[in-house]
Image (cartoon, rainbow, N blue to C red):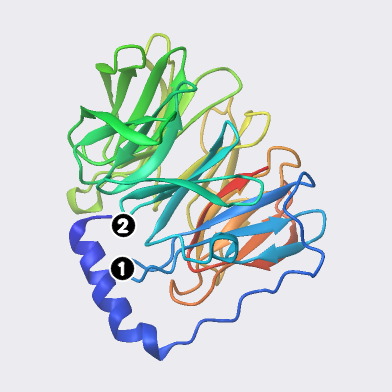
Amino acid sequence: MSKNTLFLLFIFFSLIYSCKKDQPPERPTENFTLGNTGGVFVVNEGNYAFGNAKLSYYNKAENSTIVDLFEQTNGTGVGDVLQSLYVFNQHAYLVVNNSGKIEVCDPVNLQKTATISGLTSPRYFLPVSNNKAYVTDIYANKIWKIDLTNNTISGSIHLNGWSEQMTSVFGETFITNFTNGKLYVLDESTDNLIDSIVVTKGASSIIQDANGKLWVLCSGDATSSISPALYRINPTTRNIEFSQTISGSPSRLCTNGTADTLYFLNSGIMQFPINTSSIPSTPIITQGTANFYGLGIDPQTSLIYVGDAIDYIQYGKVLIYKPNGNYVKEFGAGIIPGDFWFQ
């Protein structure tokens, strides 16, 4: 999202936010527990510059929901625009974009244990060892290095443009760059950029499939008449093995637990196997009157979770579907449910 777009959204919400009341959040059952029964964290971005981001938790076994687990546990909101969540080594890392920070919490009770501050506009967190993680950023023109032993910024790696999702393969981190239309390769032992793979503009989502191949989804650039596209890349040779342009506005590429089936949003939910020769043009689940925004696949059950942002103002909800596209149920969430983390 560009600076101009963020500014316009700020003005938009400033004018109408007080005129439209949020829907009341779904109340948890009295016997709700955050434990080993299995559950789903829902990352709710909230409205830019309003500081109303929330981390929800859905207990699958008890079919109960806490809409703002972070505030309920810590007595304060998580901040302004909760972008993503990563759980690693008994810590949950909550990346708060417009607040320029990462909240470090106990993943069992979400009690805050530390705050990593001083970031510009962080997006995604990726640990590459027990002691080090990388964080991408919109405006900083760099990748942040995080010391996980003391939860501080230990340095940075210069990288022009808006960097997005990352994945680690055999000691190398592959970084999508939304601005430049490239997939950058970073040596984790030296923190040096060693290569770049040219894709189209709007590179954002990246996943690794069951065959070890990387898939990169790019949204293109409508102002320059550049179409969105999907790429399959061999991380060893760094060659592009498959590419296909896509119409519409694709986003949120992800995979199921066995990593043999891919999904993304595009006015519905697209589904296709990794050995496909062509991406299907028809979604397995149509969007209808909903506003699909976030997407995640439960690695244990293969159930599809999709965040419905509704109008970006009131509390959203999460819809659950079977892999064949049949509707299962839904539950309440915060404003703009955009990402998921499955226990």
Write down the residue under mark 1: 49
Q: Amino acid at mark 1?
A: Ala
Tell me if residue 107 comes above or below residue 61 in the rendering. above
Mark 2 and mark 1: span between their CA atoms?
Answer: 7 Å
Q: Amino acid at mark 2?
A: Asn
Residue at the bottom extreme of this rendering = 19
Measured as percent of width and height from the top left, residue 7 is found at 21, 67
- 38 or 178: which is nearer to us? 38
Residue in view at x 42 percent, y 9 percent: 236
Q: For this view, does 9 lie left or right of residue 326? A: left
Tell me if residue 339 comes above or below residue 275 in the rendering. below
Residue in view at x 40 percent, y 61 percent: 79
Circle 2 Cα neighbour tier, 10 Å, few/some/many (<14 / 14–19 / ≥20)? many
Measured as percent of width and height from the top left, residue 278 is found at 51, 33
Q: For this view, does 212 lie left or right of residue 297? A: left
Element type where label 2 sits in the image: loop
Q: Earlier in the sequence, mark 2 or mark 1?
A: 1
Residue 137 position by quadrant: top left
Can residue 331 be seen?
A: yes
> In the drawing, what numbered circle is on residue 223?
none
- 328 or 281: which is nearer to us? 328
Tell me if residue 121 comes above or below residue 239 in the rendering. below
Measured as percent of width and height from the top left, residue 160 is found at 17, 34
Residue in view at x 45 percent, y 64 percent: 53
Residue in view at x 54 percent, y 17 percent: 212
Write down the residue under mark 2: 98
Q: Quadrant of the N terminus?
A: bottom left
- 278 or 80: which is nearer to us? 80
Q: Quadrant of the C terminus?
A: top right
* Mark 2 and mark 1 residues within 8 Å of each other at the beta carbon: yes
Residue 241 position by quadrant: top left
